[in-house]
Amino acid sequence: MGQTPQTSYVTALRFPFLTRFYDRVLAATLKEEKFKRLLVQQSAIQPGHRVLDVGCGTGTLTMMLERDAPEAEVFGLDGDADALDIARKKVSAAGAKVTLVQALAFDPPFEPGSFDRIVSSLVFHHLTRAQKALTLEKCRDLLAKGGELHIADWGEAQNILMRAAFLGVQLLDGFETTTDNVNGLLPELIARAGFRDVAETHREATVFGTLALYRAAAP
Ligand SMILES: C[S@@+](CC[C@H](N)C(=O)[O-])C[C@H]1O[C@@H](n2cnc3c(N)ncnc32)[C@H](O)[C@@H]1O
């Protein structure tokens, strides 16, 4: 397990040429609307909140956050210019008020205490353990007092069938970044970064394994 955060990252479907198919694959395989809706609901965004979607990819969740709370200020951050291009087109077509920024999750270009909510979906399984830890520390620092972190990602397999199903994701995205997820380590890593009241709030069985939702409060 590499312990040094690297500057590289994995694109949405591992290979850059697959990014353009990402939205269709996700909608067809992962109950995307359901789990993203749950994540938006548990984020409980209020008017005036500043919200950051870390690893926003093609912007589907970012736009759902904006639609749910039009009086909030919503930002999306991603390292991949191609995914952000797709997001920009979707944002523009929908007339959504969202600011998209190209940056790495563990090097976000924002001041400490800038956000009331940080939300992230299907990103942490792309990060090594060291990158997960650094990204969580950055999220902690970016949150204002009373701020909250809400994550959806691959979680501890509910049963042997879900564990077997997850091998498909591991073969695509690699074992180094995904193993801590399926072993259920994300809550511990979130707590180690200094967050309080870390909780798994939901588990969803999918054709590729168990998706989990987490919430945590800024220290
Ligand atoms: C599987 S996609 C998820 C996209 C979106 N959040 C969603 O739920 O549909 C993972 C995204 O994380 C981004 N990503 C992976 N590692 C990253 C990093 N270190 N910094 C910024 N973005 C990263 C990828 O470019 C990709 O867009």
Image (spheres, grey):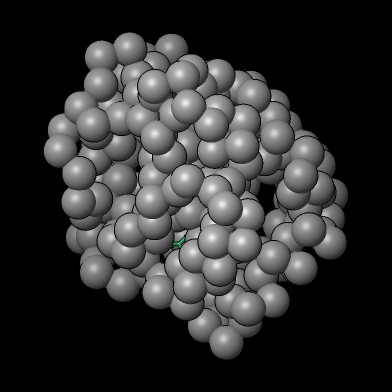
Task: Single out the residue that lies furthest toward the bottom.
Answer: 17
Residue at 57% across, 87% down? 17
Q: Is the residue 194 above or below the residue 58 in the image? A: above
Q: Nearer the viewer, residue 106 or 44?
A: 44
Left/right of residue 78 with respect to residue 192 in the rendered view: right
Q: In which quarter of the image is the C terminus?
A: top left
Q: Position of residue 19 (x, y in %)?
A: 59, 76
Residue at 61% across, 37% down? 67
Q: Quadrant of the N terminus?
A: bottom left
Q: Is residue 21 visible?
A: yes
Q: Where is residue 123 in the image (x, y as percent from the top left)?
A: 49, 53
Left/right of residue 113 with respect to residue 31 in the rendered view: left
Task: Single out the residue that lies furthest toward the left.
Answer: 111
Q: Where is residue 121 in the image (x, y as percent from the top left)?
A: 55, 46
Q: Is residue 215 visible?
A: no
Q: Is the residue 2 above or below the residue 218 in the image? A: below
Residue at 63% across, 78% down? 20
The part of the image, by quadrant, that contains residue 183 is top right
Q: Is the residue 99 above or below the residue 52 in the image? A: below
Q: Position of residue 125 (x, y in %)?
A: 51, 54
> What is the tally of numbered marks visible in this picture?
0
Q: Which of 61 and 206 is in front in this view?
A: 61
Residue at 55% across, 28% down? 69
